[in-house]
Image (cartoon, rainbow, N blue to C red):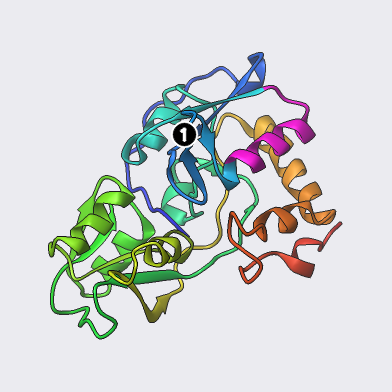
Amino acid sequence: MKKLLLTAAVLTLGTSALAQDVVRMGTEGAYPPYNFINDAGEVAGFERELGDELCKRAGLTCTWATNDWDSIIPNLQSGNYDLIIAGMSVTDERKAVIDFSEPYLPNSPSAYLALTPDVDLTSGPIAAQTGTIQAAFVAENGMQVVEYATPEETVAAVKNGEAVAVLADKDYLAPVAAESGGELVLLEKEESIGGGIGIGFRKSDGELRGKFDAAIKSMKCDGTLDAMILKPEYFGPESIHWGEEGKQGC
């Protein structure tokens, strides 16, 4: 799904997150339906509901913090929060820097959003959010990429002619297209990028990661995670979910 952050590792803190009374959960707050800020100024979306349930099952008291995407891993390592739950794809590049839980969302397609369905993707730059797997994919496949700090800016780039299309998670772009009144369209062409979405942890926090792994597995085994994924306000009844795969080893 989303996001590939190629960033140098900074020194991690030596204190385990579980030595604290509260586990601080970091997210972006700008990528619905995964995470966003609601009208009350609070973190909301699929990952808010998921994170709260995981903390409950793990017997942890948790709070939420938001951070810009381009510095979300460095600020985990510097101790501003204890984990990342922000639509982050598990990649080898990131695994060199941080550890991941087992995936809580399976891999789903990335899609192109443009002004017309017959746009030539080689005729101009493709917009993507900085540090994402989509930005890397565009660059690696011979297309011109133009990167922006936020998802909203990538869509705006298509609207104002700075890019011929934007490549992002289909789960993010489909509602944008639906709400555009026909101004924007999803292309039929899709890309399979990434290897599922997981929670990011400092490499020193193996005990905390283990608690979340167990909680994620319990939600897969009892069907709670699939039921949450399939909610219409999140990914919907036609979305990719775990099914019997998630119950292996239960």
Q: Pick whichever, 225 or 142, lies toward us.
A: 225
Residue 60 in view of the camera: yes
Whether 63 is drawn above or below 225: the answer is above
Depth check: give the residue in front, 212 or 57: 57
Outermost residue, front side: 181
Please identify the quarter of the rendering in which residue 201 is found.
top right
- The image shows residue 147, relative to residue 7, as above or below, that is below
Q: What stretch is highlighted in magenta?
A: 48-61
Circle 1 SS class: loop
Percent across and percent down for residue 112 are 34, 71
Q: Residue 118 magenta-drawn? A: no
View extreme (bottom): residue: 118
Say left or right for 167 vs 98: left
The residue at the point 36 percent across, 48 percent down is 5
Whether residue 30 sits left or right of residue 216 in the image: it is: left
The residue lying at 41 percent from left, 36 percent from top is 73
Along the line of sight, the residue nearer the viewer: 128 or 203? 128
Label 1 neighbour load within 10 Å: few <14, some 14-19, many 20+: few
Relative height, residue 161 to residue 55 (above, below): below
Left or right: 227 as drawn, with respect to 101: right
Q: What residue type is labelled 1?
A: Asp
Q: Quadrant of residue 70?
A: top left
According to the picture, the residue beneath numbered tag 1 turns out to be: 39
Residue 74 pos. (x, y %):
37, 32
**Residue 53 part of the magenta segment:** yes
Identified at 86% across, 56% down, the residue is: 250
Closer-to-camera residue (106/13): 106
Question: Magenta-highlighted stretch: main secondary structure?
Answer: helix
- Residue 75 is situated, as x and y percent measured from the top left of the image, at 40, 28
